[in-house]
Image (tube, rainbow, N blue to C red):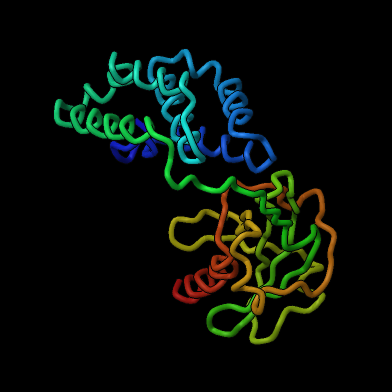
Amino acid sequence: MGTWGFGVEDDDFVADVVGVFKDQLKQGASVGAATESVLSSYANSAADADDGPLLWLAVAHCQWTYGTVAPAVLERVVRDIETGAGLDRWAGESPAVLQKRRQRLASFVEKIQRPNPKPSPIPKLVVRKPIFQRGDCLSVQMDDGTYTAAIVLASDHSRPEYGMNLIGVVDFASSAPPGEKVFRRHKWLRLTHHSWAGDLDVCWYLAHGFRPYTSRITAVGQTKPGRRDPSDSRTFCNWSHLGKQVALQREWDSST
């Protein structure tokens, strides 16, 4: 189902719509303008038997969160619930599951029929620039006090709130911080421990959450990523991950 509970917000599709709605507000749109933008963006979904009712539930949730649900939106949500629109997949689970979903929807409608007594403030855009620039050479102090090295392969600020860096870890471990020669070679760490099959330790790191690691992850120079160096990754990691694979690989190598 793409759901993890019986509530309106416990659904992947609803979460996506709410996210788009909030992004519009952060860009300065009014609640009304954000509503129009979301309905336009999800015009195809509105006609879907499953996603259509969820779309209107998401819009109603957003409008109520910031004040009052528009009459037309409330009318559509009430009609969908009364006719059972969007409940087929719940009915396919079990009568008990369907009943719980109906109960949560009834409670939701009862709530949104009145203005929100404590509407949330309109969210503001928080700009988070990437921490590092492409080519930055990073000295990374690991948990045991030793050091490894990493190179910033890309800097992405296409989404203002989610600036991020693509970082590749170098095959290096020492009791002293890395010097210039370490970065010049671009010898990437290849993971062969456990189920890894020679993959490189290359991940995206969001600017959000970096502050606790400022003392152990520092830029110590610049290099130029080459055409053969990694340029993307499907993996996103917390900053606490940076450098940990070095220790795991070294431990694996010493035991085999």
The picture places residue 112, in percent across and down from the top left corner, at: 38, 33
Residue 97 visible in the picture: yes
Figure quadrant of the N terminus? top left
User: Between 40 and 239, which is closer to the camera in this rendering?
Assistant: 40
Residue 165 visible in the picture: no
Whether 30 is drawn above or below 42: the answer is below
Whether 193 is drawn above or below 32: the answer is below
Whether 84 is drawn above or below 157: the answer is above
Figure quadrant of the C terminus? bottom left
The picture places residue 137, in percent across and down from the top left corner, at: 77, 68
Q: Residue at x 49, y 25 (%)?
A: 70
Q: Residue at x 63, y 54 (%)?
A: 204
Left/right placement of residue 6 relative to residue 122 reads left
The picture places residue 213, in percent across and down from the top left corner, at: 61, 73
Left/right placement of residue 80 relative to residue 145 reads left
Q: Residue at x 44, y 34 (%)?
A: 61
Left/right placement of residue 51 relative to residue 183 reads left
Q: Residue at x 50, y 34 (%)?
A: 63
